[in-house]
Image (cartoon, rainbow, N blue to C red):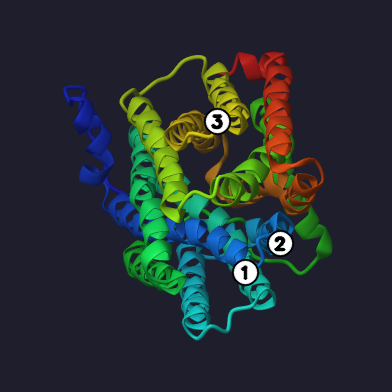
Amino acid sequence: MQGEIQKEKSLGYIGKLLLPVKVSTHFKFLWIGQLLSALGSSITMVILPVVVYSLTGSTVVMGMTMAMYMLPNILALPFAGLIVDRIDRVRLMLFTDIIRCILMLLLASLIFMDLLTITILYILVAIYGLMEGIFQPAYSAVRAKVFVPEIRNAANALTQMSNQGIRLIGPALGGLIVSVASAGIGFGLDAATYLLSFLCLLFLKEIKFKKVKPIEKSKLNYKQEFMEGVLVLKSHPWLWITILVFSFINICYAGIIVVLIPWLFNVHHHFEAYVYGLGMAFSGGGAVIAALIFGGKELWHKRGLLAYGGVLMSGIALLIMPFISWAPALIFLMAIEGFGMMIFGLIWETSLQELVPEEAFGRVASLDMLGSFALLPVGYVVVGWLATVIGGEITIITLASLVILTIGIALSVPSIRRFN
C-alpha cells in the first residue's frame, strides 16, 4: 500500500478489522486473489487423499504422494529466496498462478478420461510443489510490503480468517463433489480459481520493491547473500529457535493431518467423504474464531506463550482423536486443532513482518520454509510406513505426544517464553 493511512482510534471492532480493505487497494486485490485461490486449494486438498486412497488404499502411497509434492518445493526454496529478492515478486506470483492453473486442468482432464495413474499423479504433484516453492516466498514478501504497520494485525487476521472461512466451504464442497460427482470437477474448479487469482494480481504490478544490488555471476556472491538471510535469523533468537523447533514438530503434525487424519476418517472409520470434508471445514472454523479474536486487538503481550500454547492445544486435540469413534466429536476436535494452529500462525507471521528487513524478506521467508519443511518428504513416507507397521491409531498417539513434549522443551527457553 502506497497511500497514507490515518489512525482511526474511534473505529469499532469491525471497523478495525476491515480497515485494510478500506485504505489499501493493493491489499484488496491481493486479498481477493488469494481468497479465490484458497477456495480451489481447499477443495483439492480434500479430493487428493480421496483419489489416492481410491486408487490404492495405501497410507504408504499417500505418504509418497505428499513427499513428491514437498521435495521439489523444498529444493526450490534456497534458490527461490535469492530470486524473490532480485526479480519482481508480483511477476513471479503471476507466473506460478498460470502454471498451477494448467496443472489442475491437466489433472482434471485425466480424471475425466479415466487415464490418471499414481505415476502421472506423482509427476503433476511434483511440478505443483515446485511452483509452490517459488510462489510462497514471493507471496510472503508481497504481504510484508502491503501489510504496513498501521494495518498489520488486522490485515494478517483478515487474510487468515477469510482464507479459513473459505475453507469452511471448500472441504465440505470437496467431499460433496467426490460423493455425488467427480474429483475432476474439483480440480477444474481449482484451475479456475488460479486463473482468477492471476487476474487480481495484475492490479499489483505497479508496486515497487527494494532490491539487493544487481546480479553478479560469482559463486561467492550467491553464498554471501544466502548467508545474509541466515544472519538476519541469527540476530533474533525467537526466529531461529522457532524454525528449528518446527523442523521437527511439522513432521509429526503434518504427518497426522495430511496422511493419518484422511485415513482415520475415510479408511479406519469408513465415514462418507463428506464427513472428512466437514472435519477439515471445522478445522477452518476454529481458525476463523482464532483470527477474529487476534485481529480485534492491535497489540498482544506474551506472544511467545500464546503462540506455543496454541500449538500445545492442537497437539492435545490430536492426541485425543484416536480414542474417539463418534464423528461429531472428531469434527469438534478438528475445530480445536485449527484454533490452536491459527493462533501460532498469526503471531509467527506478524513477528516476521516486524523483525525482517524488506530487502531480505524473500531469503528469510525461504529459510523459514526450508527449515520448517525440509524433512517433510521423508516424514510423510516414514509416517505412512510406520502406520502400516504399528497401526494408524498408535502412530497418531505417538506423534501427538512428541508434539506436546517438544512444545514443553521449547517453552523452557527464556527467549521463546518471554517473546513479547
Q: Please, what is the three-letter code of the amino acid marked with disc 1?
A: Leu
Check if mark 1's residue and mark 3's residue have beta carbons within 8 Å. Answer: no
Left/right of residue 383 with respect to residue 39 in the rendered view: right
The residue tagged 3 is: 324
Q: Nearer the viewer, mark 3 or mark 2?
A: 3
Check if mark 3's residue and mark 2's residue have beta carbons within 8 Å. Answer: no
Residues at marks 3 and 2, CA–CA distance in whole angstroms: 25 Å
- Callout 3 secondary element: loop
| x and y percentages locating residue 166 in the rendered image | 34, 50
Q: Nearer the viewer, residue 57 or 402?
A: 57
Q: Please, what is the three-letter code of the amino acid marked with disc 2?
A: Val
Crowdedness of circle 1 by 10 Å Cα count: few (<14), some, many (20+)? few
Among numbered discs 1 and 3, the one appearing first in the sequence = 1
- In the rendered view, tell whether residue 324 sits above or below residue 359: above
- Callout 2 secondary element: helix
Task: Kindly identify which numbered label has been placed on residue 55.
Answer: 1
Image point (69%, 31%), residue name: 397
**Taking the image as drawn, is residue 82 in sight?**
yes
Q: Nearer the viewer, residue 304 or 79?
A: 304
Among numbered discs 3 and 2, the one appearing first in the sequence = 2
- Find residue 132 and report its image quarter: bottom right
- In the rendered view, tell whether residue 349 sits above or below residue 66: above
The residue tagged 2 is: 61
Among numbered discs 1 and 2, the one appearing first in the sequence = 1
Image point (35%, 24%), residue name: 298
Residues at marks 1 and 3, CA–CA distance in whole angstroms: 27 Å
Check if mark 1's residue and mark 2's residue have beta carbons within 8 Å. Answer: yes
Residues at marks 1 and 2, CA–CA distance in whole angstroms: 10 Å
Crowdedness of circle 3 by 10 Å Cα count: few (<14), some, many (20+)? few
Number of callouts in the render?
3
Image point (74%, 19%), residue name: 409
Q: Please, what is the three-letter code of the amino acid marked with disc 3?
A: Ile
